[in-house]
Image (cartoon, rainbow, N blue to C red):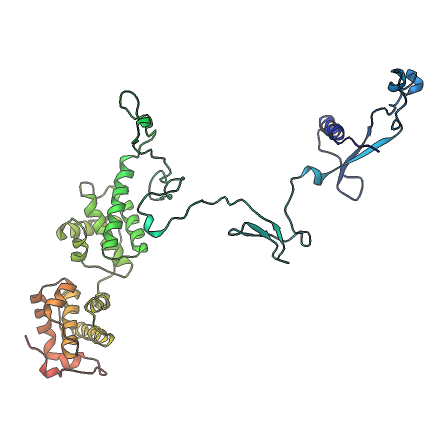
Amino acid sequence: MICFEREAAQVMLMYHNRYKVDSGSSCPPPACSHTMLHQKKILCPGAPRKGRGPSARGGSWQQRQGGEKSPFSDNVLNVCLSGDALALPRVQCPNHPDAILVEDYRAGDMICPECGLVVGDRVIDVGSEWRTFSNEKALKDPSRVGDAQNPLLNGGDLTTMISKGTGAASFDEFGNSKYQNRRTMSSSDRAMLNAFKEISTMADRINLPRNIIDRTNNLFKQVYEQKSLKGRANDAIASACLYIACRQEGVPRTFKEICAVSRISKKEIGRCFKLILKALETSVDLITTGDFMSRFCSNLGLPKQVQMAATFIARKAVELDLVPGRSPISVAAAAIYMASQASAEKKTQKEIGDIAGVADVTIRQSYRLIYPRAAELFPPDFKFDTPVDKLPQL
């Protein structure tokens, strides 16, 4: 029996559409065990039709034309249209058809996790066709989808910015640029973006982690949207937000350290700091001597024993109320000076003052307050290189 696939498919499509139009529903359910949608008898060329056989019209079409009768005139072709024939081809493991295939992006293979059979190979990789190294991030960005989304900006930073053309094809005959930005960035977004860049620059100079930068950006956005500090410079607000974020994250920095990486005076940063706390109705934890001790000792290159002794001396001096009205930074500097003078790693007041950001006179004043009771301040297990009675009296 000869099967004309093209004619069979056309007849099946016509039957399927006619059934949907007549009944207003999809194809009837299968009548057999396999996924058959419907069956229809398709007559091959030369097969007699109902009521129009040779007896009714005086012979078949070949006989009426003077030819011989087709040997296939009595054959009927049964075509079954299955659901699998209409569906798209599905890549699956022949032994484990229900298993979820694993894609090897490097080799481009689809692998069955049950038996390890490579079902499909040469899978198209829809990822980027380049690699960006760490030293190339500051240079030309090869991505074609724009910058990463910034939730701190109003438009999500999803706008497309067209850069200025450099070639002759970028300008018309009058010298005007052919391609211009349809939508420019708003002034508020531009101001916040510049502030975010300044915050990132200041944080990089004093080696602050990413979580502090994110907190600073959120603080600046809240202050900028409230417009409670209108008239203040954005750089001053950004510096104060960075100072607040450091204290909230438990890694406080001094005003002098923030002032050293910004272009704003210490007095202006202090004013903005108080205004921001009042506007946002927030607070920060009090600064203690232990917040700076580990960083100061690390920058001075002091061993762990000296650092623990300085921490103990500063905490004991505060408990005994030996340094009333003194800032924690000056007390920490005096404690470091006393611990270093009692150990083999001796540091001068000038060296400690440069790291702590305090003057030599301030260190001497705090040291004179704690020196009379120095024997009570050192930890019991401290190994003295210089006895307490031989420490400098200043």
Q: Residue at x 73, y 34 (%)?
A: 27
Residue 215 in the figure: left or right of residue 320: right
Classify 232 as above or below 59.
Answer: below
Spot the residue most to the front.
Answer: 67
Residue closest to the eye, 392 or 270: 392
Residue closest to the eye, 297 or 284: 297
Give the quadrant of residue 88.
Answer: top right
Spot the residue most to the left.
Answer: 394
Q: Residue at x 28, y 24 (%)?
A: 176
Q: Is residue 325 visible?
A: no
Percent across and percent down for residue 306 are 21, 75
Residue closest to the eye, 355 or 235: 355
Percent across and percent down for residue 310 are 19, 74
Q: Is residue 270 visible?
A: yes
Q: Residue at x 18, y 49 (%)?
A: 272
Give the quadrant of residue 292.
Answer: bottom left
Residue closest to the eye, 51 or 375: 51
Classify 156 as above or below 8.
Answer: below
Percent across and percent down for residue 297 are 21, 69
Percent across and percent down for residue 144 are 40, 39
Total numbered circles: 0
Spot the residue most to the right.
Answer: 55
Quadrant (top left, top right, bottom left, bottom right) of the C terminus: bottom left
